[in-house]
Image: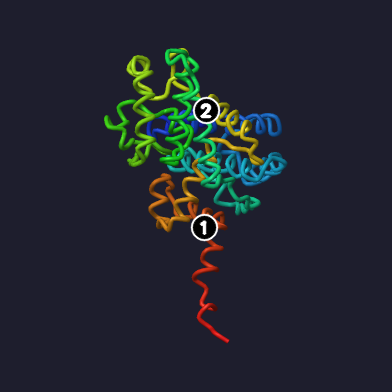
Amino acid sequence: MRSSIQNFIFHCEFEKGLSKSTLKAYKIDLEQFYSFIINEYDNLSINQINKHQIKAYIQNISTQKAKTTKRKLATLKAMFNFLEFEEELEINPFRKIKINIKEPQTLPVVLTLDEVGSVLKMVYNKMYEIKNLDSMYYKQTVRDIAIIELLFATGIRVSELCNLMFIDVCSEFTSIIVNGKGNKQRVIGISNNDTKNILKKYYGLFQDQIHNTGYFFINRIGKRLSEQSVRFAIDKYCKELKFNKKVTPHVFRHSFATLLLEEDVDIRYIQSLLGHSSINVTQIYTHVSSKKQKDIILNKHPRKHIHI
């Protein structure tokens, strides 16, 4: 089984070109399944695994969140499908099982336009108050503003932001090329002058380190900025504003999509901007936009045409 897992990981890395984070998750999921099999069934071969072992594994991990369970099973199913295609399997056990794990539907957290404005005003004010323009504090504040502006301007994921390469940023800061999930590229334009100006200012402060690493967003020691550093910075600013919600980089992505929808942007354009492979994923924003629903009921409902 160990050899089969390694063959699948090789396929995902070198033939499908999946990201490091996806590969890491696959390895963790498959290691957990491998440990379960050798502990419960004395190390069965891959061809001896049938639907009964799969069902037992599902029961074993069912105490975890539904989303986590679904992901782990999706990883396992992908491996067995690959092994079947490669003719390493005689029978794919997943063809004998029907799995329907329902996730509780939770709507994403979003910021209102006023709340986004509050964040931006606060960080810009911090920058204006700094007297020493050569200090690291000033440089980091400019970088943080550039991060928040770009997250809201483009709706990109925090992983996409941290992996953004300098060569993928337009020289005039009017667009970026984003390498999304599955190595799918998309181009997102940047139209707001404040966003372009802060990106230009940030680049001017960090250009030596940017050219040395190739990455656009740099930490204080001149290396690629980590996702955790971005989360920490955003959490710090929003706690200072005392928002009654947990704000992460992904909240800016949700807010980007929801506020565009409220401006009557077609959901298929939003799907393209977000890099969603399916419109079904983007549909959740139609449920989030309560403001839009109120506007429709207030202004579009046909009852207003009935006079008594």
Left or right: 55 in relation to 120 = right
Whether residue 188 is visible to the viewer of this picture, yes or no, is: no
Above or below 68: residue 237: above
Q: Which amino acid, by three-letter code, is at mark 1?
A: Thr
Dot 1, crowdedness within 10 Å: few (<14), some or many (≥20)?
A: some
Residue 123 drawn at (x, y percent): 51, 30
Residue drawn 65% across the image and 36% down it? 242
Residue drawn 47% across the image and 45% down it? 256
Q: Which residue is mark 1?
A: 286
Whether residue 105 is visible to the viewer of this picture, yes or no, is: yes
Measure the alpha-carbon separation of dots 2 and 1.
28 Å
Q: Which residue is mark 2?
A: 230
Residue 169 drawn at (x, y percent): 32, 31
Q: Which amino acid, by three-letter code, is at mark 2?
A: Val
Answer with mark 2 or mark 1, whichever residue precedes in sequence: 2
Could you tell me which quadrant the C terminus lies in? bottom right
Where disc 1 sits, the SS reads helix
Residue drawn 59% across the image and 37% down it? 247
Where disc 2 sits, the SS reads helix
Left or right: 110 in relation to 149 = right
Above or below 208: residue 90: below
Residue drawn 39% across the image and 33% down it? 17
Between 10 and 169, the residue placed more toward the observer is: 169
